[in-house]
Amino acid sequence: MMISEIDLHDNFIVTPKIIPDDRGYFLEAFSQREFQENFGHKLSVAQVNCSLSKRGTVRGMHAVALPGQARYVMCVQGAVTDIALDIRVGSPTFGRHQAVTLSAENRRALYLPEGMAHGFSPLTDEATVVYLCSAPWNPGAEFIINAADPELGLPWPEAGELLLSDKDRAAPSFREAREQGLLPDYAACREVYDSLAKSGEGAR
Ligand SMILES: Cc1cn([C@H]2C[C@H](O)[C@@H](COP(=O)(O)OP(=O)(O)O[C@H]3O[C@@H](C)C(=O)[C@@H](O)[C@H]3O)O2)c(=O)[nH]c1=O
């Protein structure tokens, strides 16, 4: 398993070791031991989510108010463009996004700590995404940044009309979300990371 930071602070790509044999192959999709060795703390898993999306769908950009929710995202069928957006005000990479391809072939995972916004869209006719979450679903704490915000210019795979949920379509732009005071402060995120690290759980 290889863990490397992407261009966004505190966000990582995890590349598992694939062990082939005559039957197919084996891999450790998540290893608490390796996670802890690399991050110095555990990922506390409160929920494992799974969604299937048709081509043209965009789910995102979803965030959870602090103490937030860290996510460890994998694609187990097909392939997706998965995007992390740094909405932590004061972060060295504030306002930047990074798109990564997660697929049933490359088997990579993307780790996003608390405070990030997240979304994805299939590169194949259908894609199934499975993700570990550090906190249970709390609809009252969710907020959304519009995935089609032209100022963000997120690189979704399909041109034209995106297949969005009603709440994603109605979501404010990044600028409006900031004006509405929705975005978390980086210093507050770091406090969450530090306290979780001290307790041995959660994000770095
Ligand atoms: C997120 C979530 C939704 N639901 C329900 C609410 C609704 O009826 C149905 C679909 O919910 P949504 O439209 O919010 O699902 P979706 O748009 O797939 O939401 C997800 O998007 C990705 C990008 C994320 O990062 C996740 O954190 C989550 O926000 O499932 C749960 O029961 N538990 C959950 O944890």
Image (cartoon, rainbow, N blue to C red):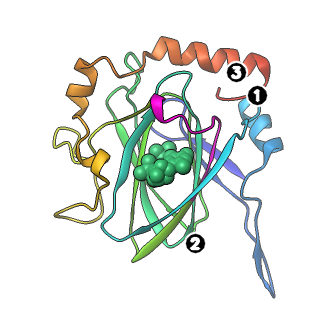
Amino acid, disc 1:
Gly
Chain part drawn in magenta:
130-141
Q: Position of residue 25 (x, y in %)?
A: 75, 76
Based on the displayed image, in which of its 4 quarters is residue 179 positioned? top left
Q: Position of residue 140 (x, y in %)?
A: 46, 30
Amino acid, disc 3:
Leu
146 and 24: which is toward the camera: 146
108 and 141: which is toward the camera: 141
Distance, label 1 to label 2, CA atoms, is 29 Å
The residue indicated by pointer 1 is 40
Q: Position of residue 115 (x, y in %)?
A: 48, 28
Amino acid, disc 2:
Glu
The residue drawn where x is 39% and y is 15% is 90
| Secondary element at tag 3 | helix
Residue 133: within the magenta?
Answer: yes
Location of the C terminus (image quadrant): top right
Above or below 156: residue 112: above
Circles 2 and 3 in contact, beta carbons < 8 Å: no
The residue indicated by pointer 3 is 196
The residue indicated by pointer 2 is 105
101 and 55: which is toward the camera: 55
Distance, label 2 to label 3, CA atoms, is 33 Å
Above or below 11: residue 178: above
| Secondary element at tag 2 | loop
| Secondary element at tag 1 | loop
Above or below 125: residue 150: above
The residue drawn where x is 33% and y is 63% is 57
Cβ of mark 1 under 8 Å from ligand 1: the answer is: no
